[in-house]
Amino acid sequence: MRDYKPQAGSCAQINIFNIMLFTFQMKRVFYIAFILLINQAVMSQTTEKITLGMGCFWCGEAVYQHIEGVVSVESGYSGGHVKNPSYREVGMETTGHAEVVQVEFDPEVVSVSDILAVFWEMHDPTSLNRQGADVGTQYRSIILYHNDKQKEIAEQQIELLEKENYFDKPIVTEVKKFEAFYPAEDYHQDFYKNNPTQGYCRFVIKPKLKKLQKKFDDKLKNSNR
């Protein structure tokens, strides 16, 4: 059998090829990472947030997760004076906070006006410090605006609703500048998704979602229609 004798320079050629391949792969990885960073930056520039209290945050979260154009919804506490409050502390009504949902949305898809239109329909804005069986200042109706445009639209809508006597009683919704948001404990997040058969979900949240579908079918994500 004839002995194999590699041609001169063959190993060097293989090494050069491997180096070129590795360089190409690394460039591809960096390119993909760069594109992801750019997309994230663009997303953060094109979305905005509004913070809303409409009773128990489980309800608010479940409602806004169904709206087309809503990027994320997080349950938490806002509107008070204590940093990093717990659910128990907020429930004792000593922190000044309300149970809220922080809604991040794409204004190119869903407007602030539409976000607030859902807000008025999905709770009772004439009920002071309570929603149904949930009683306490933490359940108050509140809009925490993040910019002057949100404040202006909220106040205009309240004025119009009052002028048209849309509700039987005066609106008691507090309109306040947003200062801080403190996420609620993990077990409160995605509560309806994780506990659809729980009593509160079946008897309180589910009827709200049916009402949402009836009144705002054109605003819902395709998967929820």
Image (cartoon, grey):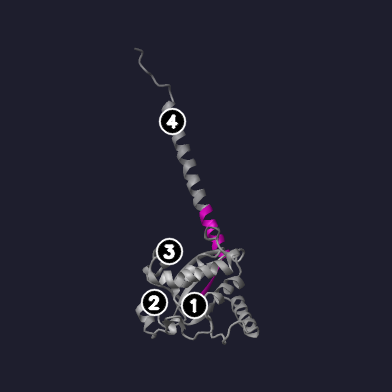
What's the residue at 49%, 86% (across, down)?
Answer: 128
Q: Which mark is residue 193?
A: 3
Marks 1 and 3 sit apart, C-alpha to C-alpha, by 19 Å
On the image, the x and y values in percent for residue 149 come to: 62, 76
The crowding category of the residue bearing disc 3, from other C-alpha atoms within 10 Å (few below 14, some 14 to 19, many at least 20), is few
Check residue 84 in the rendering and tell me which mark sits there, or answer none: 2
Mark 2: which amino acid?
Asn
Q: CA distance from mark 4 to mark 3?
A: 55 Å
Name which residue type carries label 4: Ile
**Compared to 42, does 94 lie above or below?**
below
Query: Along the polypeptide, which appears first: circle 4 or circle 1?
Result: 4
* Image position, residue 72 (x, y; %): 49, 65
Badge 1 crowding class, 10 Å Cα cut-off, few under 14, some 14 to 19, many 20 or more, is many
Foreground residue among 74 and 194? 194
Q: Nearer the viewer, mark 4 or mark 2?
A: 2
| Residue mark closest to the camera, 2 vs 1 | 1
